[in-house]
């Protein structure tokens, strides 16, 4: 079998299986939401670390009964798999990263927000450094006036991969702890102050 055939097969099968697996994990875990009951309807940026993004769709669905969001995802093959997986949860994609093709991605993100979409970002993605905030989320928020919801997802039982982001996969029959801030406004902050605020907010419940 050729590499192209294997990739095409993976893109057809893996996202569907992955979406079922995510639903299974969510259903078999208890859930604790330490988060506002609601947020304003205006377009919002949702941010979480790359290693915690697996169960993010369920935090988003708490606030938007009808999904209307685009998530920044790497344009590489693994990013394509993620893109097709989150599509099963009604989420769209902006392909690229804030490190490569940064200007193009920034323009697409700004356009999405101005068109009324929420945007999902992993500030340390797609390749790290882990838990370091890149410039893209700051620029996008300040150029659109969009506020940011900072999200942490902490399962009590989990597998942790040896990848750069220490990607976390919850185990069944534990508890998913979702932490989310009220929307924060970084419009008047300089770049470094905004980065520090976001980094601190996303590490609030680190052990």
Image (spheres, rainbow, N blue to C red):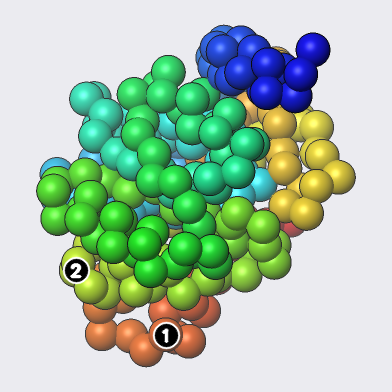
In what element is the residue under mark 1? Answer: helix
Q: How many marks?
A: 2
Q: Is residue 134 above or below residue 113?
A: below
Residue 51 in the image, given as x and y percentages of width and height: 66, 47
State the residue at coordinates (78%, 54%): 164
- Is 31 placed left or right of 127 in the picture? left
Q: Nearer the viewer, residue 180 or 145?
A: 145
Q: Is residue 126 above or below residue 100?
A: above
Residue 111 in the image, given as x and y percentages of width and height: 20, 55
Kindly indicate the quadrant of the structure image that contains residue 169.
Answer: top right
Q: Quadrant of the N terminus?
A: top right
Find residue 191 and name its label.
Answer: 1
Residue 18 in the image, given as x and y percentages of width and height: 61, 18
Find residue 159 and name its label.
Answer: none
Kindly indicate the quadrant of the structure image that contains residue 71.
Answer: top left
Q: Quadrant of the C terminus?
A: bottom right
State the residue at coordinates (86%, 45%): 162
Question: Which residue is outermost to the right?
Answer: 162
**Mark 1–mark 2 contact, CB under 8 Å?**
no
Q: Which residue is mark 2?
A: 145
- Is 81 placed left or right of 102 in the picture? right
State the residue at coordinates (53%, 71%): 134
């Amino acid at each position: 079998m050729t590499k192209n055939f294997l990739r095409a097969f993976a893109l057809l099968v893996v996202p569907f299986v992955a979406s079922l697996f995510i639903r299974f994990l969510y259903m078999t875990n208890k859930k604790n939401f330490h988060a506002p009951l609601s947020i304003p309807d205006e377009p919002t940026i949702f941010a979480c670390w790359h290693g915690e993004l697996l169960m993010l769709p369920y935090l988003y669905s708490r606030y938007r009964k009808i999904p209307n969001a685009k998530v920044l995802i790497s344009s590489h093959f693994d990013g394509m798999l993620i893109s097709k997986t989150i599509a099963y949860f009604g989420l769209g994609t902006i392909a690229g990263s804030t490190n490569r093709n940064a200007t193009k991605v920034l323009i697409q993100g700004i356009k999405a927000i101005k068109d009324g979409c929420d945007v999902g970002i992993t500030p340390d993605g797609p390749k790290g450094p882990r838990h370091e905030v890149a410039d893209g989320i700051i620029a996008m928020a300040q150029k659109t006036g969009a506020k940011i919801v900072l999200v942490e997802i902490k399962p009590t039982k989990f597998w942790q991969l040896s990848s750069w982001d220490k990607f976390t996969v919850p185990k069944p029959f534990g508890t998913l702890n979702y932490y989310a801030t009220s929307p924060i406004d970084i419009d008047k902050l300089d770049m470094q102050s905004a980065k520090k605020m976001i980094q601190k907010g996303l590490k609030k419940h680190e052990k």
